[in-house]
Amino acid sequence: MIVQSLVAILTEFVITQSKAEEGYGKACKVDNRLSILAADGDANACRTLALASNAQEFQLGCQDIKNADLVMLTKPIGITDKSARLRSSSLLENAENANRSPEEFAACAKLWGSR
């Protein structure tokens, strides 16, 4: 119960709808729960949510702010991976993103501050 309360508090604190020029929000997926991070959120913010949930991994990505069903995510990242970050290539590695275009990958990577 305490852990769930902590996760809820962290989620409310960290998560706000961020709107990028490309129309994406920074997504963080932990235990099948997708959250949108603040515009200045990073991999550590997502890792914090994973740790608070006692999860062993998390995923970074983007969610279309106009269509919440359009999401692209990296493959799962272990909570101990200190070099976790999102790149176009990390989105391409996830087979679930097969229907997305290189332009979408690039827009998502730009939102996260990489290529």
Image (tube, rainbow, N blue to C red):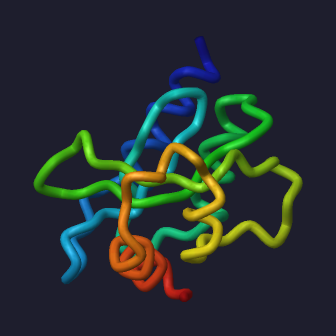
Q: Residue 14 versus residue 25: which sits nearer the camera?
A: 25
Where residue 45 sits: x, y (%)?
Answer: 58, 60
**Residue shown at 31%/63% (left/top)?**
25
Where residue 113 sits: x, y (%)?
Answer: 50, 86
Please indicate whether residue 98 sits to the left or right of residue 114 in the image. Answer: left
**Residue shown at 62%/73% (left/top)?**
89
Where residue 7 sits: x, y (%)?
Answer: 54, 33
Query: Compared with residue 92, is residue 20 higher up or lower down, i.e. above or below?
Result: below
- Quarter of the image containing the N terminus? top right
Q: Which quadrant of the structure image shows residue 50?
A: top right
Please indicate whether residue 50 sits to the left or right of residue 36 in the image. Answer: right
Query: Compared with residue 58, is residue 106 higher up or lower down, i.e. above or below?
Result: below
Please indicate whether residue 76 sits to the left or right of residue 36 in the image. Answer: right
Please indicate whether residue 108 sits to the left or right of residue 46 in the image. Answer: left
Name, please, the residue furthest toward the left: 66
Name, please, the residue furthest toward the top: 1
- Quarter of the image containing the C terminus? bottom right
Q: Which quadrant of the structure image shows residue 76?
A: top right
**Residue shown at 42%/75% (left/top)?**
102
Q: Residue 67 versus residue 94: which sits nearer the camera?
A: 94
Query: Compared with residue 113, is residue 72 higher up or lower down, i.e. above or below?
Result: above
Label count reads: 0
**Residue shown at 39%/60% (left/top)?**
62
Where residue 13 sits: x, y (%)?
Answer: 41, 51
